[in-house]
Amino acid sequence: MTQVHPAIAAEQTITFKDIKKHWAKAAIDGAVKNGYFKGYDDGTFKPNETVTRAEFAALLARASKVQAEKDQTNVFADLVGHWSEAEVNRAVSLGYINASDYPNGFKPSTPITRIEIAKWMASGLAAADVDYKQALQDTVTTVLPVKEYFKPGIPQSQSPYIAVSLGTKLMSGYPDGSFGLTRQATRAEASAILLRLNTVGQQKADSFVGLNELREVGTKRTNMESISPFSTNGSSFNDVAEKTDTLRNNAGTIKFHHFIIVDTQDFKNQKGIYAPMFVDENEYVSSLDRRGIYRAFVEITIYPKTEHFSLSHYYNGAEMLVNGERKVTDFLQEKYGYLTLPYLDTEEFFSNYRNGKGVRLWVAQFIDVEYPYRGLKTDDGSRVSYDMKIE
């Protein structure tokens, strides 16, 4: 790979002076040892410099041990004679890069974005393994545990690549809850990602619990089979999703969207890919957070009809499966950008969503393994219920 300065040979054992306390030091050392990256002759690695499309394509080509079924040549006209031409062609041949994504040329010197990296890696995995290909199909409509999913929204054309990257831990989000779709990747990030890709490529897609959760939510609107002992046992949340459920008191209607579980039995060791999105480990721990208790987060839309609709109308009229509490902290709902039930001035809150507008939000429930049964019947007679899994 062309560098600004002559590069230090990868096989040399060296400690770069600018990574001694860097979060990615171990990954950088591993990437250099494996020959993916090289340092500079001044003893630095420059971990925070960006990586171009050409550079990342070359890294993928070097890191992959797979042989392409058919070698692609002359893929991009603007790469003829470029130092990365052969390696970009190999990345295309291995399925990492889809040439149709770059109809106006590859533009090799363009800094690569994180969504591009996610798409390239997930596409390469899918090209090598049919189950990863199926995982891409399963996660088109999944709920992504990143803030961009809620605001401004992520196109379904991009969602599967993010889902596979997050679900396999190839990539992770930032502390502010974002995935950073358009952020430019650094040499440090690329080092860490490439090392993970080498490991992920040797594992089956269904060996990743997080990816299984995302796939189940994408196909069944819940992750309960992947993360909990509960099951719909033959019924399906899909049967009642997006259908009207009139409150028993006729004060309004509800539509169900998703039912997501977080394993909070050990509150300081929460399990599930959705845990960071819904549960703050520093929040007050309820007496219900104990062994045998799970937290569930239900996404619904409430359509108020009664003039002075308040929380009491919702609590007194909703069926158990869609009847929840406000157990999402202000910090998390603001961080990710979704809504939950209001604390105060509930009549005023719901007055903004009358006349068919509706408000989409998340409510929380505690599920006890001793008494788990809950169900929902929509106005057209469709039903769903869940209980303990039938072995």
Image (tube, rainbow, N blue to C red):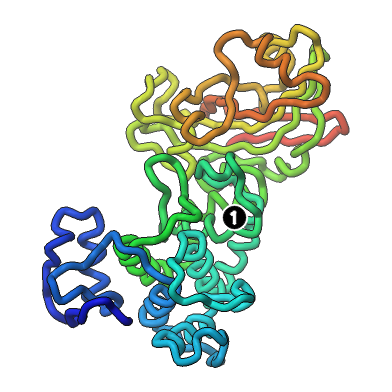
Left or right of 26, for residue 270: right
Query: Residue at 36% of width from left, 30% of height from top?
Result: 281
Judging depth in this view, the residue of 167 and 240 nearest the camera is: 167
Total numbered labels: 1
Question: Which of the two residues, 364 or 330, is positioned nearer the viewer here?
Answer: 330
Query: Label 1 neighbourhood size at 10 Å, few (<14), some (14-19), many (20+)?
Result: many
**Quadrant position of residue 37:** bottom left
Q: Position of residue 162 (x, y in %)?
A: 52, 56
Quarter-of-image position of residue 6: bottom left
Q: Quadrant of the N terminus?
A: bottom left
Check disc 1 and give the amino acid type. Ser
Q: Secondary structure at mark 1?
A: helix
Q: Is residue 389 above or below residue 317?
A: below
| Whether residue 390 is visible | no
The percent position of residue 277, horizontal first and vertical second, equals: 48, 37
Q: Is residue 105 visible?
A: yes
Rendered view: 12 above or below 140: below
Closest to the observer, 209 or 281 = 281
Where is residue 122 shown, x and y percent of the image? 52, 67
Residue 258: x and y in percent read 65, 38
Residue 379 found in image quarter:
top right
Left or right side of 380 for 23: left
- Look at 60% across and 29% down and name the residue there: 362
Residue at position x 40%, y 73% from top? 56
Outermost right residue: 380
The residue pinned by badge 1 equals: 159
Measuring 11% from the left and 72% from the top, which residue is drawn there? Answer: 14
